[in-house]
Amino acid sequence: MIDTHNIKANIPRLEWTEARRIVIKIGSALLVDCNNGKLKLAWLNSITDEILKLRAQHKDVVVVSSGSIALGRNLIGLPPGPLELDYSQAAAAVGQISLAHAYQDVFHQRGMVAAQILLTLDDTEERRRYLNARCTIEALLDRGVVPIVNENDTVATTEIRYGDNDRLSARVANIIGADCLVLLSDIDGLYTSPSYVGQSSCRIDEVREITPEIEAMAGCSGNTIARGGMVTKLEAAKIALAAGTHMVISSGRVLRPLKVLSEGGPCTWFIAQSDPVTTKKRWISGLLKHAGYIHIDKGAERALLEGRSLLPAGVKRIEGCFDRGDVVVIKSIAGVELGRGLIAYSNIDAKRILGKKSTEIVGILGYNGRSELIHRDDMALMRKSVK
């Protein structure tokens, strides 16, 4: 379904103002001058000021940044145009240092800390590595750090790489349960035909479903240093919407692009039909396979039905062989299935902290794990309230 009704200027969208967790993807063409291959420091300082304001509003922000290859190729004298994989990796190895230092400097100047996270396709697709990436990002956000994510181009092969940061940013948004994904680009949205081919074209202001008609509107990238294009942005939209995350394509070719977006400037919004937690719970409830059973007492059962997480203290018995992140069935003391969830510990560690207080976990296991055995956001119950 397509809504081409124009967004009124200076009226912020709720998808933006109510978002508590935001992923911002920055394209190479915005950060690196295609004429000289150097960093656009004025623009970088501009977007950093905006991230500082978002943090002051108690919003979590993760940045997915391109630019390492574009910076590196200039430093080692590679010619314009597509690069073979080995030269692309070499450019990334050089450019990533410059890019990381630039982010570190601009955030430090504003009293913030930035962290570098390099991911490959396997890091977001393999369950254990996915969980490790999520825990790392969550820990950084909990400490007020701004994670700067990029694909690890220096080690990713043709077979195991995203090849663009549009889809990577959507997977990062999925990993952390983001409310909104912002793709800052050299174009201000999705047009009915590629705007650079000279045809009459209109911008689509809102998309609620990625239909074949929408996909037909995508063209290829017209930029020599960017690897994405509208095709990969629509692929990102599919990933984001399926995970319950709203997505917006907005122009980054201005200083303070997030201010323009917040004031209802030109863009294309892709509207998810449910929030990230609801989507995740629906996925959990539909899983047919499980790795074990968690039997809980009446107090824990009541706490779950009141919307709380499952703590080790309320667990009476554990069955099965499972690892962190596996799906387990939650049962009452009478053996009635209450729901399913993603367990935060292996069966071995879970049995060691069974019936214990959360404050005792570090003393028993020797490391400070999660206080919840199953977090409420990782749980889908068959009953929704206390009788």
Image: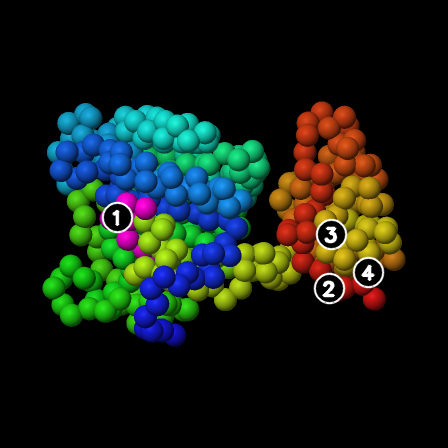
Find the distance from the CA under tag 2 to the CA under tag 4.
15 Å
* Numbered marks: total: 4
Find the distance from the CA under tag 2 to the CA under tag 3.
11 Å
Disc assigned to residue 336:
4
Q: Which residue is mark 1?
A: 254
> Would residue 155 appear left or right of 143 to someone viewing this image?
left
Q: Secondary structure at mark 4?
A: loop
Q: Amino acid at mark 4?
A: Val
Q: Which residue is mark 2?
A: 384
Question: Residue 305: x percent and y percent?
Answer: 77, 59
Task: Return the residue nearer the eye: 268 or 177.
Answer: 268
Q: Which residue is mark 3?
A: 308
Task: Return the residue nearer the eye: 327 or 14.
Answer: 14
Q: Amino acid at mark 2?
A: Lys
Pointer 1 or 3: first along the chain: 1
Q: Amino acid at mark 1?
A: Val
Task: Return the residue nearer the eye: 258 or 386.
Answer: 258
- Image: 217 above or below 110: below
